[in-house]
Amino acid sequence: MKLRDLPSVDELLRDERLAAEPHELTVTAARAVLDRARKEIQAGAMPGPLVDAVLAELAGAREPSLRRVLNATGVLVHTNLGRAPLAEAALARVVEVGGGYSNLEYDLARGERGSRQDHLAPLLRRLTGAEAALVVNNNAAAVLLALAALAEGREVIVSRGELIEIGDGFRIPDVLARSGASLVEVGTTNRTRATDYERAIGPETAVLLRVHQSNFRVVGFSERPQLTALAEVARRHELPLVDDLGSGALVAVGDEPTPAESLRAGADLVSFSGDKLLGGPQAGVVVGRANLVERLRQHPLQRALRADKLTLAALEGTLSVSLDPDARDQIPVLRMLHEPLEAVQARAEYLAALVGGEVEETVARVGGGALPLAELPSAACAVEESLAEPLRLGDSPVISLVRDGRTLLDCRTLTDAEIDEVAGAVRAARRDA
């Protein structure tokens, strides 16, 4: 075939197999197919049946881009894979609230307009001991809102060792700049004392900010002031102390601080994520003193950053489970974190028996910028290295880890119910390889 033999878009659309397809979508698909065909001819290749290619292009356009995947990486809170999977209770609340109308901003008792912030505040107060609470769409938004409401046009003091960058280029100095506040750095990268903050306080100081070193640790010759000492400095100067915790652990998990601990130590506002160690949806939570939370609620940015009804429903379901210490393993992240190695090994052995693989000892990670030094003993089913790509591209995508010439399917991040599905994906990948 030569370039002059290619049909026009109009000629291609006259095929009866395309007659029932939406015109605009079909035109776009036909143009894409013809463009590829021209390139193939110029490269010396022969394009396939053009109408079949248009139909395939249309089918591909209708396929959802956001898909469920099977996480066999051993990273529990995998940012690229959607972070925390939701508990059944959270999913049930999303279905119930999202399937119809809700009292999102309607007070049923008074029969008048209400606030979406009122639904989760009682749960968060009970779980953290805070006077008040507010939910926005992520923790970066929570920090931005707090600084904008409390320090716009004034100064925020923060340690140089806490000017962190997390995933996707999110940097604390950038958030400070967008809030309208000015950054005042104190201390050094590895050593900062409470006296450093006190010396930096001036007439323009509005907030003392502490940022948890969530995705890294400074070890060796290092020093950070205790939160209680920083709170004493803030109280002497009548300044609010804002503590950005990041990970959102409501219960003790390794050395991750909890919001309740932070508030008891003297923080005035504490912010944290909903989709990390809390195990819920993407959200940012601020808890603390009622008068300060109210300033955040009244700030114009709050409306732009607020969470939608599905996020609130999922977070409510997650927090409800968190209230019951005996039910917390219903939250997938906490279950994976605390599951005995023996149970993980049993899953790996079962998968290996199904696919003819080998069991290999591995180390799982928490991920999501939490507990960076924590190593979780784990077990994986090892199969051929060549299967990694077809597993990723299969009908049920399996995301794995390639190491030492083999594909590892870490079973700490797989559930019992997913093992047969992974085994089927491995068999399909071998057929396609």
Image: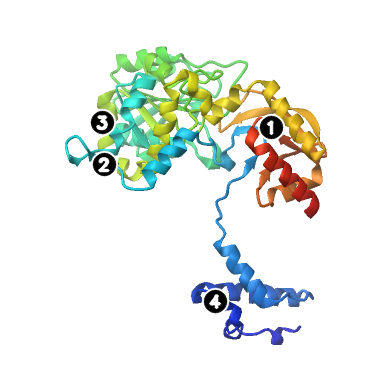
Residue 14 appears in which quarter of the rendering?
bottom right
* Mark-to-mark CA distance, 3 and 2: 17 Å
Which residue matches tag 4? Answer: 27
Specify the label residue 105 is tagged with: 2
Of the residues shown, which amino acid type is indicated by label 1? Cys
Q: Nearer the viewer, residue 80 or 421?
A: 421
Residue 129 location (% of width, % of height) = 35, 18
Of mark 3 and mark 2, the one earlier in the sequence is 2
- Whether pointer 3 and pointer 4 mark residues with C-beta atoms closer than 8 Å, the reply is no
**Secondary-structure class at tag 4:** helix
Which residue matches tag 1? Answer: 411
* Mark-to-mark CA distance, 3 and 1: 45 Å
**Secondary-structure class at tag 2:** loop
Quarter placement of the N terminus: bottom right
* Mark-to-mark CA distance, 1 and 2: 42 Å
* Mark-to-mark CA distance, 4 and 2: 44 Å
Which residue matches tag 3? Answer: 294
Drawn side of residue 421 relative to residue 356, left or right: left
